[in-house]
């Protein structure tokens, strides 16, 4: 059975990230599943980068406590991660660069010598590392060469062949000197076809599937790769991607595009979202659909830009001045990210309100292998539902006159309705007009300060929530058997895979547990959610923040108070082992 | 053809004698003369006395937030580049709260028309000084006189990349109509700064004040010369106000440069379905 962790570390700016993705792809192309995670500081050169890949026979979305193969391109990699090594771990390094005193399994590779013999650039240490790693893990060197060839296809055969020399040198160094230590963890086998995507890639892909046509953003870690993905695809898929001057412009550009009839989204992190919030409220009262992607990082303010946290939940749920409905979703993994992103666009259109999709650095930047078959099936089954968007009006008059506008057949943008939703007319449609008004308004959109129309419109907007809860809200998923479990975890968003792994570890220790995992965060169906909680069980809240924000939301909405909490807020993801360790103590 | 009644919504609530009346009529006249109807034009209003025109002018419209009309207008244009888009804003709105958006809208040569009501004050919040107020202007928010020097909107937009910059005086409706028509007719980013007396809160920049200081650019004025345009525009700093088209050049607009909009507008194009092209590189 294959289940191991490979890590490469080195100085920032030396291609560690690219190397990590290549390794992940070799693993998936060799028939395995992966989940990877990257640690890097908020700077471009210097500092330390570490990229780890968890490879397994089965689907995974968590990290292992130990590292099986550690490739050290500098001493810092070893020092920072040696606490995760075991007696069987292999450590790759160059004795010419630094010494390791501890008694561990050393794989000494002459990186420096290979570079100078073959006249390579320092960055090509990565290429050597890949050859070394594939050699050590019993992998298929042809797969590696294929990927290298794809990567440099635009640069021509000369560059490809030059890179091959370094791959081969690394591979041979291991085969020759360490044949007895080779782990056959990555032997090529038949597996299903997988995509290697991050949560951000999944949001971008979900957006294209949903026929989103405008994406507007300002770069902000860890959301920026959505912008770069979609910017790269825009001509191919016929989308317009605008990198605006600031986040206020970002959301207002998207609101303008959405008003004009195209599905529009924005993406940012907490700080950028803070700038957008006035306009979220604007989307709320004008009932212009908008999808907002928030990849959280530890705040407040600039915080820790390249690390992870779930600290913006309550901020997102209650964002915006005044009272207006919105929907907040938080996918648990990359598959859910594709599904819920595509659903978010439908919800925004159906309910004509802002829909927030929450991620965090851990989910946004980690690659996970996602079955191509799953994605293809989702694409073929997904239906674009634009709700009550219309591009013609009944009683169409070719020439509008004040008379037709004053008649009973007049189009009313904010017409009162039982479900709270009114027909939304595509601007430019002949024979009518209307205004989307940020002021309180009467049914036709004109401004009002009268009491009754105000009450009518507030109630109408609120009814959209009632309709949503009836028609499109999804209850949390329960993993494990709720009835049989004395211990029940409660979590939301990206902690899902970690807790699923913790449950497995607990089962091995004879502890039966269940997980109630929320991905439709707000609003909640209060009565139905309440019914999930029983008196005689121990509930444990798990969140990647210090306040237990979802716990507070749950208490506020349902009165349910979860006493036991596992909270982590040091910028790192929670691990399954931490959960088990803490649970045993409780 | 549409009539003035077709474009007329509620009766305006502006103060008697306010320059907005003239601008309101000029906008409707310009739209009519361009052959547009309330169905065939998009308007975005800022917040302020100028923005209150939202209820008085019929069109596909957004009454936006304070300062945010320009990005809304840009968004509409991206989605439907065949629809004429105008932003009707005030000086505090566009040069103050939304100043950053203005710079970048100019840079992008987004094909929108920005009509600025420039009265030097925040009328709707009862007369605090605006970014265009003359240095020393006394108001409720600057009781000892404003310390900052005024923004020169003409120089600002010119040097930020606007491809059409004009100025008119609200007291000259005929000229204002022609400026608005030319601006909407211009392909690319166009701005018309309209000098507008606020009869209630601005006792300095009155009709009399402007009548003594505005002058029309001559027929022989070369409007495609950037340096001359900047020079002329700088006269505002000496309280001389040239009116007319100060600058106009042809350059590709933002949407002109997007190959994905060559065939059709974003809102009307067919759905993309060749998903393997996107998923393939992830394998």
Image: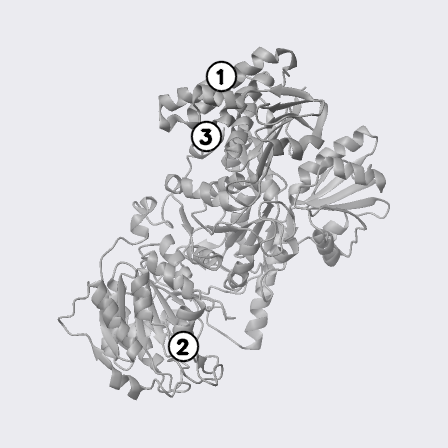
Residue A483 percent coordinates (x, y): 81, 39
The answer to whether marks 2 and 1 mark residues whose Cβ atoms lie closer than 8 Å is no
Quadrant of the rendering where the N terminus of chain A is positioned: top right
Q: Number of labelled discs?
A: 3
Task: Give the residue pinned by disc 1.
Answer: A168
Q: In this view, does B65 lie to the left or right of B212?
A: right
User: Above or below — where is B58 with respect to A570?
Assistant: below
Q: Name the residue under label 2.
A: B10
Q: Badge 2 sits on which subunit?
A: B
Residue at which label 3 appears: B280
User: Which quadrant of the view contains residue A182?
Assistant: top right
**The residue marked by circle 1 belongs to what chain?**
A
Q: Position of residue A509 (x, y in %)?
A: 82, 30
The label shown at residue B204 is: none
User: Eyeballing the image, is A365 above or below A298?
Assistant: above
B6 left or right of A316?
left
Disc 1 is placed on an element classified as helix
Tell which residue pokes out farthest to the left in this image: B220
Q: Is mark 2 on a helix, strand or loop?
A: loop
Judge whether residue A366 can be spotted in this image. no
Q: Residue at x 37, y 72 (%)?
A: B151
Query: Counting other residues with Cα less than 10 Å from the Cα at mark 3, is it few (<14), some (14-19), or many (20 or more)?
Result: few
């Amino acid at each position: 059975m294959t289940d191991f962790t490979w890590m490469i570390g080195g100085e920032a700016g030396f291609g560690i990230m690219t190397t990590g993705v290549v390794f992940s792809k070799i693993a998936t192309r060799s028939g395995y599943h992966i989940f990877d995670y990257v640690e890097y500081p908020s700077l471009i050169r210097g500092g330390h980068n570490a990229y780890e890949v968890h490879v397994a026979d089965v689907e995974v979305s968590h990290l292992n406590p130990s590292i099986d193969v550690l490739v050290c391109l500098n001493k810092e990699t070893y020092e920072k991660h040696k606490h995760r090594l075991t007696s069987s771990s292999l450590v790759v390094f160059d004795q010419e660069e630094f010494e390791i005193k501890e008694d561990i399994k050393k794989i000494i590779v002459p990186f420096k010598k290979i570079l100078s013999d073959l006249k390579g650039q320092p960055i090509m240490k990565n290429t050597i590392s890949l050859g070394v790693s594939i050699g050590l893990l019993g992998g298929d060197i042809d797969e590696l060469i294929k990927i290298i060839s794809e990567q440099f296809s635009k640069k021509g055969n000369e560059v490809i062949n030059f890179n091959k020399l370094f791959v081969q040198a690394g591979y041979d160094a291991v085969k020759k000197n360490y044949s007895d230590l080779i782990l056959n963890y990555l032997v090529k086998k038949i597996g299903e076809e997988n995509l290697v995507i991050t949560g951000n890639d999944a949001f971008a892909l979900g957006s294209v599937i949903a026929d989103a046509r405008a994406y507007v953003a300002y770069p902000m870690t860890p959301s920026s790769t959505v912008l770069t993905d979609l910017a790269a695809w825009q001509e191919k898929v016929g989308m317009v991607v605008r990198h605006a001057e600031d986040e206020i412009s970002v959301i207002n550009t998207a609101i303008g595009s959405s008003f004009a009839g195209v599905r529009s989204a924005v993406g940012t992190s907490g700080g950028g979202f803070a700038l957008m919030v006035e306009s979220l409220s604007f989307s709320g009262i004008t009932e212009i659909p908008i999808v907002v992607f928030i990849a959280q990082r530890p705040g407040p303010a600039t915080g820790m830009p390249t690390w992870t946290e779930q600290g913006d939940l309550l901020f997102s749920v209650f964002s915006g001045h005044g009272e207006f409905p919105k929907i907040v979703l938080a996918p648990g993994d990359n598959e859910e990210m594709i599904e819920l992103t595509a659903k978010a666009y439908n919800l925004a259109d159906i309910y004509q309100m802002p829909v927030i999709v929450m991620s965090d650095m851990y989910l946004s930047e980690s690659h996970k292998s996602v079955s191509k078959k799953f994605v293809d099936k989702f694409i073929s089954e997904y239906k674009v539902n634009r709700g009550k968007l219309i591009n013609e009006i009944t009683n169409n008059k070719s020439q509008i006159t004040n008379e037709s506008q004053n008649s009973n057949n007049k189009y009313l943008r904010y017409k009162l309705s039982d479900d709270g939703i009114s027909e939304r007319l595509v601007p430019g449609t002949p024979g009518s007009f209307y205004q989307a008004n940020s002021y309180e308004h009467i049914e036709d959109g004109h401004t009002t300060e009268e009491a009754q129309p105000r009450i009518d419109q507030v109630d109408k907007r609120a009814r959209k929530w009632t309709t949503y809860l009836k028609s499109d809200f999804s209850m949390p998923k329960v993993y494990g058997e709720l009835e049989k479990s004395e211990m029940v975890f409660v979590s939301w968003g990206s902690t899902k895979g970690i807790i699923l792994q913790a449950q497995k570890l607990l089962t091995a220790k004879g502890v039966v547990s269940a997980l109630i995992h929320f991905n439709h965060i707000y609003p909640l169906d209060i009565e139905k959610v309440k019914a999930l909680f029983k008196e005689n069980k121990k509930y444990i809240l798990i969140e990647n923040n210090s306040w237990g924000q979802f716990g507070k939301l749950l208490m506020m909405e349902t009165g349910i108070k979860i006493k036991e909490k596992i909270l982590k807020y040091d910028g790192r993801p929670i691990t399954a082992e931490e959960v088990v360790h803490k649970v045993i103590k409780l | 053809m549409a009539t003035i009644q077709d474009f007329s919504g509620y009766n305006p609530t502006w103060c008697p004698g306010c320059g907005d009346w003239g601008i309101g009529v000029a906008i409707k006249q310009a739209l009519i003369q361009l052959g547009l109807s309330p169905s065939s034009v998009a308007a975005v209003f800022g917040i302020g006395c100028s923005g209150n025109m939202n209820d008085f002018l019929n069109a596909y419209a957004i009454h936006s937030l304070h300062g945010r009309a320009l990005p809304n207008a840009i968004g509409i244009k991206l989605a439907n580049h065949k629809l004429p888009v105008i932003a009707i804003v005030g000086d505090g709105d566009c040069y103050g709260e939304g100043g950053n958006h203005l710079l970048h809208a100019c840079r992008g040569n987004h094909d929108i028309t920005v009509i600025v009501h420039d009265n030097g004050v925040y009328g709707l919040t009862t007369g605090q000084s605006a970014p265009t107020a003359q240095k020393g202007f006394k108001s409720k928010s600057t009781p000892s006189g404003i310390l900052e020097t005024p923004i020169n909107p003409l120089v600002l937009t010119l040097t930020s990349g606007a491809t059409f910059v004009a100025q008119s005086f609200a007291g000259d409706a005929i000229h204002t109509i022609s400026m608005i028509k030319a601006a909407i007719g211009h392909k690319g980013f166009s701005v018309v700064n309209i000098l507008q007396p606020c009869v209630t809160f601005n006792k300095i920049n009155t009709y009399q004040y402007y009548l003594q200081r505005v002058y029309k650019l001559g027929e022989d004025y070369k409007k495609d010369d950037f340096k001359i345009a900047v020079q002329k525009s700088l006269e505002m700093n000496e309280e001389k106000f040239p009116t007319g088209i100060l600058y106009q050049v042809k350059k590709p607009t933002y949407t002109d440069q997007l190959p994905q909009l060559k065939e059709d507008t974003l809102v009307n194009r067919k759905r993309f379905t060749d998903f393997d092209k996107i998923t393939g590189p992830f394998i």
